[in-house]
Image: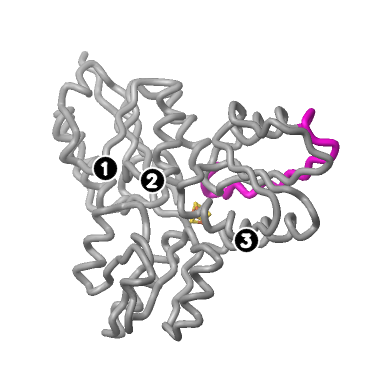
Amino acid sequence: MSLKTEIRLAPNSGFCFGVKRAIKLAREAAETNKKIVTLGPIIHNPQLVERLRQRGVDSVDNLDAITDQTVIIRSHGVEHNVLEKLKNSGAEIIDATCPYVAKAQELAKKLSREGYPVCIMGNASHPEVKAIRSYIEGEVFIIENENELPEKNFTRLGLISQTTKSLEDFQNVASKLLPKAKELRIVNTICSATSVRQQATMSLALESDIMIVIGGYNSSNTKMLAKICQNIIETQHIETAVELQGNWFTGKFKIGLTAGASTPDWIIVNVYNEINKYTGNGCPFVSSIEEIPGYKE
Ligand code: SF4
């Protein structure tokens, strides 16, 4: 008897609350027929950015490119001084900063105002981290992991994280920093949507023969999902279905799918249907993400 291949999607895959909200605001803005731009791509997904461009929502990289357009601040937020300049320029602003990111900015400011040097665990070049950093008024350290700890010791130190980092990495950093600070104030700013998706992905990877991670190559949270899966099982990170290769699925009977917070549903659906073709199972093709086995919002 030949084994039937199963393709399952990790629960909580795809758009998170903050991304859904930003895209909704962008779509609503597009309907006003005003000139709309986002400061930086609205999410780390080139396919969705292109769809919005076709609806008249362009993306610009810096303030100089903004003249008379309405400006959407993306879910990652923006540096404090950039926001001030925009406000002073009189531009109409639609602030789609995710409330959880705004909370991390506020906490960073509060810690520094209370006299804590602040350590951010995150990627220094990521827009969200640049924005959080800009709210810190005193000393700041940005580290990727426990191998990059500041050299000095501290009387007091605040520790926060980029919202999409893994809880495990944050715990490692916190425990390594503890001997370096008399007072270590840890605020867990990791977004629950991120940790829930990571947990669900890890559980599915443990039951799968291969994991396909779907999302932008420049998406921090998608890369984190790929890292989690790679530590468990053979993993391929793709942006769209065209990158799939049939030989990845030879001898694989349990295929796991997961997707980052900025991966649109239609891309996940395409990937599922395409893998179905490769496995030759004759499973029904789906037209919405809700129909994929394992789906849970
Ligand atoms: S991952 Fe969390 S913090 Fe980041 S945009 Fe989504 S909901 Fe907001």
Marker disc for residue 77: none
Circles 3 and 2, Cβ within 8 Å, touching? The answer is no
Residue 271: image location, x then y, percent: 23, 41
Q: Residues within 10 Å of mark 2 (few under 14, many from 20)?
A: some
In this rendering, the count of numbered labels is 3
Q: Is residue 254 left or right of residue 101?
A: left
Disc 3 versus disc 2: distance between alpha carbons?
Answer: 23 Å
Q: Residue at x 35, y 72 (%)?
A: 64
Label 1 sits on residue: 239
Helix, strand, or loop for circle 3? loop
Residue 88: image location, x then y, percent: 50, 82
Q: Residues within 10 Å of mark 1 (few under 14, many from 20)?
A: many
Q: Nearer the viewer, residue 81 or 205?
A: 81
Q: Amino acid at mark 3?
A: Tyr
Residue 224: image location, x then y, percent: 45, 36
Q: Is residue 90 above or below residue 83?
A: below
Residue 100: image location, x then y, percent: 58, 58
Helix, strand, or loop for circle 2? loop
Q: Nearer the viewer, mark 1 or mark 2?
A: 2
Asked which quadrant contains residue 145, the reply is top right
Q: Residue at x 22, y 63 (%)?
A: 51
**What range is drawn magenta here?**
178-196
Q: Nearer the viewer, mark 3 or mark 1?
A: 3
Q: Residue at x 56, y 47 (%)?
A: 162
Answer with mark 3 or mark 1, whichever residue precedes in sequence: 3
Q: Amino acid at mark 2?
A: Ser
Disc 1 versus disc 2: distance between alpha carbons?
Answer: 10 Å
Q: Is residue 189 above or below residue 170?
A: below
Q: Amino acid at mark 1?
A: Glu
Q: Is residue 142 left or right of residue 227?
A: right
* Residue 156 covered by magenta stretch: no
Answer with mark 3 or mark 2, whichever residue precedes in sequence: 3
